[in-house]
Image: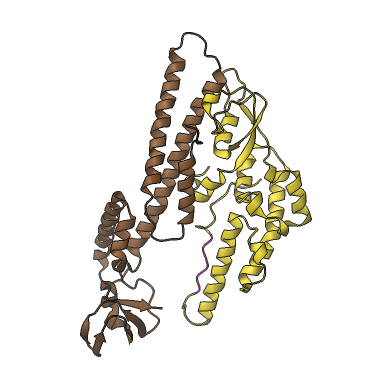
Amino acid sequence: MNNDEYYDIDSILAEHSKIPCIFLHDIDASVNLTGDGNEIASNSRVELPFWMAKVLAQYRLPNGESIVTIELPRAYGTRVRNSLDASPTSIDFRQVSPYFYQFGTKLYDLIIDDQLPATLEKAFKARLKEIMNISLTGSTNVGQDFLQKLDETEKELFKAGQESTAELRKWRHRRRQQLKPVSLGHRISSQSSTN
Amino acid sequence: MTTMMGESSYKLAKEAKRTSEMLISTYNDDLVQNVCREIRMLHARAEASVREMRNSDTAPPNVPSQLTQIMLHHLTIKRNKRILFAYHHQRLGKLKELSWGVGRQSQERKIKESLSKEENDFLESYGDLVNDYKSHFLDIDLGGNGGVGLDPPLDLFIEVRVLRDAGKIITEYGELNLTKGNQEFVRRSDVETLIKAGYLKHIA
């Protein structure tokens, strides 16, 4: 995590997303992992928030074993990927994973999956065209249902597009002397680069 | 306690996200205190666990479980700390913006009520710093506290609404009668100080 990301609220919220973990040991009820006071048997699957799961997965016990192993979350599984291939613009990211792209990039360190970056990139490009189309033409009614399906990153991009259009309109009507570009920097936090 | 650790801090993070576009938002003292309390409690528990593991003569029943517990406490403490930092960092950024931006005067009371005591202290000291800095360049209006700022004004006359009764004002270009609720079309240079003082409000 680079320094800028520590204070970033979106990064914090993205790390709250749950990820399935398989425990390799028994965990007592007193540890209260899931919050309901149950104990966890070996080889059972529990969904933990990413900020917990990441460290637990990387930790090694004194005898060299791990405590948990991680699985790819359902949001990045085969079914979602197939739907993305079939029709990227019809997936509802708000239901699947509101921080689809940011959480996806965080998974790179933890899970070895060669296809994941390519999948994210392809989906992003396809949806971006639609987003920019709607935000830059200023049509208010068209595309409302697509706008309900955006994840947080896409929402920020959409807002930036809207702001640009509004600024341009003001400039045209002489309410602005100088047309300044909308800064994406403070809206989109820097994300780990794909290889 | 059967609630999941880290719930209060998650609520705080969501609130930070919700207020990220607002300039002023009320300081959520309750949530912050909850998170701090949770940190202290987790810390005490973790310390107790470590001491217990160190002191016990017999081998502990379930090493991975105890280690997981300690790690969980530690991770939650770090997470709470991060969220607390991020929440305050976001608010402080806005306070700094306030000191450089326009229109602080007219809403001073509302601002004071929304902030915690420490934030109010910060706002004052930072405001002093800014004024100190500006005092070196009194010819240039760098913005802040009702000044126009670095952008040159676009129009000679502006629309203003009167917020408080000020009676008859004599300016170099004529008289102005200010009664509360009236809307006037006046020369910008005349009314700049009045806007700063909160008597008038500029209507865009």
- Looking at the colours in the rendered structure, which chain would you say is drawn in yellow? A
What segment is highlighted magenta in the picture? A179-184
Q: Specify whether residue A7 is in view.
A: no
Q: Quadrant of residue B105?
A: bottom left
Q: Is residue B97 left or right of residue B124?
A: right
Q: Is residue B79 left or right of residue A106?
A: left
Magenta span dominant secondary structure: loop
Q: Is residue A59 left or right of residue B162?
A: right
**The magenta stretch spans residue A182:** yes
Which residue lies at the image location 50% right of the left edge and 33% below the top edge? B2
- In the image, is residue B45 above or below residue B36? above
Q: Looking at this rendering, what residue extends furthest in the bottom direction? A: B174
Q: Specify whether residue B89 is in view.
A: yes
Which residue lies at the image location 73% right of the left edge and 57% below the top edge? A88
Q: Is residue B111 left or right of residue A71?
A: left
- In the image, is residue A140 above or below residue A156? below
Nearest the camera: A113 or B137? Answer: A113
Q: Quadrant of the C terminus of chain A?
A: top right
Q: How many marks?
A: 0
**The magenta stretch spans residue B124:** no
Residue B125 drawn at (x, y percent): 26, 54
- Looking at the colours in the rendered structure, which chain would you say is drawn in brown? B
- In the image, is residue B124 above or below residue A56? below
Which residue lies at the image location 63% right of the left edge and 73% below the top edge? A137
Residue A31 drawn at (x, y percent): 52, 26
